[in-house]
Amino acid sequence: MIDRMAATPSPASSPFRLRVAERIPPTADLVVVGGGVVGCATALAATGAGLRTVVLDARPRPATLTTPAATGAFRLQFDNAEELALVREGIDFMDDVAARTGLPGYDIDLVRRGYLFCAFEEASIARQRSIVELQRTFGLDDVEILSGDETRARFPYVSPDVRQSRFRHGDGTLDQVRLAWAYALGASNGQGVERPAGSAAATFALGTRATGFRIGGDRVEAVETTAGEIAAPLVVLATGPFLAATAALAGVSLDIRPTRRQKVVLPEVPEVPSDAPMTIDEENATHWRPALRGAFLLCTEPGTTAGEPAWEVPGSPDFAFRLLDPASPLSAARLCPFWADSWERGDRWYLQAGQYEYTPDRRPYIGRVGPDGLAVNGGYSGHGVMSSAGGSRLLLDLLLGRDTAPPGGLRAADDPFRVDRPMPEREFDLL
C-alpha cells in the first residue's frame, strides 16, 4: 500500500521519509483531515498513542497553505492563562523537537531573540503595565517593563518617540514549515529515541480531499474522499480556515472567520540587526522580525473583514505600501526610523498571504463536536504554530479519556477550549 516515500526538506542528510500512500488505506483508528502544522501535530500525538493514523490533505504536500505564510514566531506574552499554558507546552516540545519526534539532529531554526512591544501613548503605557501585572498572576515573571531610554540603550534602532516597552527575552522565532515536517516525519516513521512503546506509523494521503462523512446513528463511521472511503471510529478536523466548511459536511455549524493576513518579505535590509527581537508597535500592530538578510514585516490590521476560505490568498501591494511608506500611519518607520531609508532606497520586497481562522473569542476549538467520534483541532486565530503541540496532546487526552498533561499543562478535565463554551467577543489581539 505504501509504495513511495517523500523526501523531507530539512535537514538534507536526514534518512527519514514521509510515508505517502499510493492508495488510501481502507481503515484507520483515526483520520486527520488537514495536513498543515496543526494536522501534522495531531498525527504525531495520535501515533504516539498507538493509533493507526491517516492524514488527508487536498494538496500534494503537507504544510503548503497557511503554514508557510505564518510569521514563524512564539511568545508567552498572552493575556490569558490557558493559552499561555498551551504555548508553554508547545515551546517545551520545540526545544526538544529532535528527541520528541525521533529525528536525531533535526533543526527547526529556533532562536530566542525576544518580543519587544513598544508604546508611544499614555493609554498604551498603562495597558502594558496592566498586562504585565496580569501575566505575573499566571506565573510569567520574566517580562520586563523598560522606559524609553532603557529600550533604546538595548535596542538603539528604536524610535526616540517610544516612551516605554515590555520585553521578554525567552520569546523568539523558528522555521514553522520545518516544525510541521518534524511532526509529519515523526508520525510517519513511528520510531525514535523517545517515541513511546507501541507507537504506530501515520500514512499521508496527499492530493486527497475529504468530500463527506458516513454517519451511522449518532456516530461517525467513515470519511468519504476523492479517492474512496476510509472507515475509522475517530476523525479530527484540522483544516484551518476551511474548518467550518469541513465541519458542515458532517452537519456541524462552527463560527470560524477566515481573515486575510499578509507578510512583506524583504530579503535584504542592511540596517536590520540579525539579533533583533520581534519588534512591535503596541498601538497599530505593525511589527517586524529578522529573516534572511532582511526582515519579515507584518501588521494584523484590526479592520480587516472576514471572508470565505481560499486555496489561493492574493497579496495586495497596498498593504506593503502602508507598512513601508513613512507617510503612512502604519509605517514601520514610526517604530524604527531606518525603515524610511529602506523605503527611499527601494529595497526589493514580495508578499505572502494566508488566512487566520478566528473564533469569536480568539481562542481555539479543541475537542469533540457533532456525531460521536468527530473532533476539531483548529480556530487558533494566528497562534497555531506555537500552540500545535500542546493543543494536539490535549485533544488526544480528551478523545482517549487519559491525563498526560505535563506539570502546569492543561488537563482534559478542565476542557477550556471546548466548542460549546461561552463565547464572548474578546478584545483585539495585537498579534
Image (cartoon, rainbow, N blue to C red):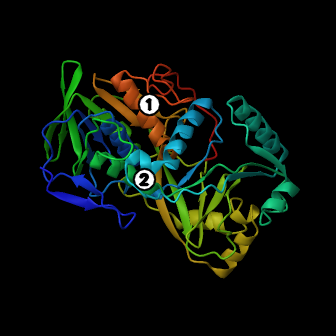
The crowd level at tag 1 (other Cα within 10 Å; few <14, some 14-19, many 20+) is many
Q: Amino acid at mark 1?
A: Leu
Residue 74: image location, x then y, percent:
57, 49
Task: Indicate whether 366 appears above or below 319.
Answer: above
User: 234 left or right of 153?
Assistant: left
Query: Which is more toward the observer, 41 or 95?
Result: 95
- Which residue sits at x=40%, y=44%? 38
Q: Are discs 1 and 2 less than 8 Å apart at CB?
A: no
Residue bearing the label numbered 1: 394
Query: Which is more toward the observer, 259 or 371?
Result: 371
Query: Which is more toward the observer, 166 or 1?
Result: 1
User: 183 left or right of 204?
Assistant: right
Task: Indicate whether 108 appears above or below 27.
Answer: below
Q: Which mark is residue 334?
A: none
Q: Is residue 397 visible?
A: yes
Residue 191: image location, x then y, percent:
30, 46
Residue bearing the label numbered 2: 66
**Quadrant housing residue 340:** bottom right
**Quadrant housing residue 187:** top left
- Which residue sits at x=84%, y=59%? 161
Q: Is residue 239 visible?
A: no
Residue 389: image location, x then y, percent:
45, 41
Regarding mark 1 in the picture, which secondary structure is present there? Answer: helix
